[in-house]
Amino acid sequence: MEGKARARIEFETQPDRYRHWKLSFPEAYGGDVARLALDVREDGGLFSGYALKLNSYDLGVDIELADALTRIRFEHPETRAVVITSEKPRVFSSGANIYMLATSSHAFKVNFCKFTNETRIYLEEMSRESNIPSLCALNATASGGGYELALACDEILLVDDGSSVVSLPEAASLGVLPGTGGLTRLSDKRKIRGDIADVFCTLADGVRGKRAVEWRLVDETVEKSQFEKAVHRRLAALKARSPKKRGERRIDWRPLQAERTATESRYRYVTLRIDEAARVASLTVDGPTEDQPATMQAIHEAGVDQWALRAFRELDDALLDLRFNFPTMGLLLIETRGDIERVRQVDRTLASLADDPLVREILLHARRVLRRLEITSRSVFALIRPGSCFAGSLLELALAADRIYMLDGQPAPRMGFSPLNAGVLANYGGISRLEARFACEPDLARELAETTDLLDTSEAVGRGMVTFAPDDIDWEDEIRMAIEERTSLSPDALTGLEQNLRFGGKETMETKIFGRLSAWQNWIFQRPNAVGASGALTRYGKPERPEFDFERT
Amino acid sequence: MEGKARARIEFETQPDRYRHWKLSFPEAYGGDVARLALDVREDGGLFSGYALKLNSYDLGVDIELADALTRIRFEHPETRAVVITSEKPRVFSSGANIYMLATSSHAFKVNFCKFTNETRIYLEEMSRESNIPSLCALNATASGGGYELALACDEILLVDDGSSVVSLPEAASLGVLPGTGGLTRLSDKRKIRGDIADVFCTLADGVRGKRAVEWRLVDETVEKSQFEKAVHRRLAALKARSPKKRGERRIDWRPLQAERTATESRYRYVTLRIDEAARVASLTVDGPTEDQPATMQAIHEAGVDQWALRAFRELDDALLDLRFNFPTMGLLLIETRGDIERVRQVDRTLASLADDPLVREILLHARRVLRRLEITSRSVFALIRPGSCFAGSLLELALAADRIYMLDGQPAPRMGFSPLNAGVLANYGGISRLEARFACEPDLARELAETTDLLDTSEAVGRGMVTFAPDDIDWEDEIRMAIEERTSLSPDALTGLEQNLRFGGKETMETKIFGRLSAWQNWIFQRPNAVGASGALTRYGKPERPEFDFERT
């Protein structure tokens, strides 16, 4: 891929700028169902060199979907179900665009898949945590990533018109995997028999109608004339599962308006600085600079500008900027700045009002951003110095880091806990970062989460919260050497190392998708059998058949 | 690697032929402790082109270790603990030989790591299931795979002599991972804090003495003069944990004496046939051809020649032969032949005597072989025709396969269950293959395991036990087409597909090692940053530093 020649990718968008998705709340469904209809503009690719035929998608299409899901939660909190369908009568979606993949660098492919995986996981999280279940209304064929999007919905309805199928043709046609969670969801979510999944995943053609239901690939199939009626029926049933909503407060999801230069993105609370030569990115997160809302009403009124929402939104945008636009930055240094008690006050307020739907969404949003940090393939060091505010929700940034450096000097910096450290912001493994850190001392994890006193450096070291605590004299040198050493190592070895060490213990569907399925896909994406001159991805759409080295690994 | 030029690798050996390990049962430890001392012969590599310096190992060294572990269980059942140490005073082990890795093909590297991983898992299984715990007595430095071997033991004792360290220098020195379970065991077994593991795994130099204890990398460190005393003390404590053994029956683990040609390995009960042109291997397992021992005494007397042990030993050897000596065979067809009731009778006998230590070992052995089948990276189809005996323990072969084809004809073939289908032979996920197959219908899994009637084809289809059931007319064509189709697909995509679909649901340390850690290692092993002209593995031991493409993936 000509990554460097491509324009900087931006991750913010809004419905009136969507080119590929249509978001509506049809009266026909009662006004409280979000309808997401895919209608990809063939010439609307994020980059040039490929046409987005057959509702295939690239990163730009998925950025819109991710935006829509966020807006449903914050701008349309009355939503009780989502239906995803296609605006094109002949195809639901043919998945990720192959020509885009074939012309992309390995790093871009991997990051693209990671982002699309996150979006699908967000769809499932929205159902599980926010009572907004989803129906995939397959009015036409869904193949590859198109069917994987369907798999991320709670229910799949397939039209029975004699031609519409669901399929995962990746292995058979492209020599790669259904890597957007497809394999994992077949086995772990839909619990499809292994041999049936094997047959399905090695068929180029897909499965339609009653067989698709028998194989548990879809939940129901109905004739075209009955399709819309079935959509209505299923949406009504989905709505009946979630409690009627009332009084939810709408939040206006205004653009962040970051100021960007080639080496800096400056937001209100977050700054991302790029040191190209050193291959180091520095992220500074400011704590609240003014009093934050302390009541439900004030939280509702403060909306998108309250620190708890805005700071994490900015952080999210900065992480995506880093992932896609600065692929050679090997190390991310995270610092915080501000009033530690203000951070803890925000956390306590949110924790005490966690039953409120908006507060709940604010917390889930922060949780998603922290999880995005953890699966970002860059080394992360947290640096704790005087003036920092690593407490509660911001302490999670340090706990998500690979290492924590804390200055041992006068005045000593401090760190602190809040109720949000006890599990509300759990990692993808489903446990709090304190539990993950102290797997061998679960009591300590619980005790720390309840600690109200701040810890200075020596106390923090004593409780196992710090990796290294250099003193004033050594700090500069030690940090400099740690940075140099880290950035000198093989970036591939570090990615593998971090992705294993960050997820010890229990596995979930999400850790399996990122840690297991994606690792195999990354391996395959690198193999000559896929990307070599006669590999399957390279030869897709060309007259010659791929040629394989048949040695099995 | 010049795989084709290398001689066929054999997996059978015996203590008097060991070149690298010394197995003894020292009187000093009471005669019931197996002492495994590593003393690698530098010029004793399995292949030419590298010297096994510093107690580094290649596949040949590990074949001996695997053999020794099996013999401890069967030939020395009185064993109550194992101590692993080095016969060389200056080094315990420096791990896998780098020059061997650097000159090996990708496929060989991956298969070598898989085998060494299996051996380490067997060491842990021996502790957990057979009450033979292990102590690693590090009388000198253990680095890389050397320390990973220590991690597979229950306890690690490190000499405190000012120079002996434990280290995982793979990432820092070689640009790869500690891929023999090291990362997974740091986090999941020893529950070491993530940041400490991060530091440890990026240090080239390793950690010694008290810091190694503080970091939980070893359990104890003692001065050289106290070392042997500490070994005694720890072995006594380990022995005290396991019940005193008496009356265990020794089994003579005689060689299998397979008859091999270029395209066939013929054992007493197992035949492996290779069709190079079609890239298909066929494995036929015969059921018992004569009456099998039905009492504890008879089982003890029949020893290594009883079907339940011998057939699975032969299968194990055939699988390793296939993995290493026939790397391009993409598909393994499994058939059985014999008297279905005889198989079930053997199973029932073993199940009813499962408290007997020897019977327990026979069952654990079969379980290991079935697990080895499942992580063998070849597609596996089971073919069930009249005259076959897919029942009980042999039905597990079909359940381990990716697909089951059963002929729908007259006379109809039959399949059947035995008590061994209920979980005794559980897969690496820790559940029975019936449970794994019917994840969406757990009641059905239980019910089938208790079914005593045989199922003919239509009954087996009805119970979800069959993938396809072609009739007499279609069988030949359908099987032929399925074979052709399967072997035409990308071998890499199939490996990834199978390794994901075979392990749905719950993860264990073992599935994480094979499914997650190994997948990342495979990816890294393929990357130019490791194996390219200026990659870290390629440049190891040369004056030039490696050069990396720093794009992060």
Image (cartoon, coloured by chain):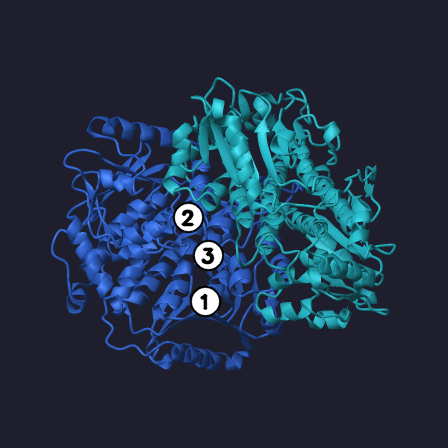
Chain colours: A blue, B cyan
Q: What element does badge 2 sit on?
A: loop
Q: What element does badge 1 sit on?
A: loop
> Mark 1 belongs to which subunit?
A
B126 or A184: nearer the viewer: B126
Disc nearer the start of the sequence (2/3): 2
As shown in the figure, which amino acid type bears the numbered disc 3? Answer: Thr
Residue at 17% across, 56% down: A345
* Mark 2 vs mark 1, CA separation in Å: 31 Å
Above or below, A125 relative to A9? below
Residue ID for mark 2 = A48
Residue ID for mark 3 = A508
Residue at 25% across, 31% down: A470
* Mark 1 vs mark 3, CA separation in Å: 17 Å
**In front of the other: label 2 or label 1?**
1
Q: Badge 1: how crowded within 10 Å, few (<14), some, or many (20+)?
A: many
Q: What element does badge 3 sit on?
A: loop
Residue at 31% across, 42% down: A464
> Mark 2 belongs to which subunit?
A
Q: Badge 3: how crowded within 10 Å, few (<14), some, or many (20+)?
A: some
Residue ID for mark 1 = A153
B477 or A333: nearer the viewer: A333
- Tell me where residue B419 appears, x and y as whole percent: 70, 63
Q: Are marks 1 and 3 in contact (CB under 8 Å)?
A: no
As shown in the figure, which amino acid type bears the numbered disc 2? Answer: Ser
Above or below, A544 relative to B430? above
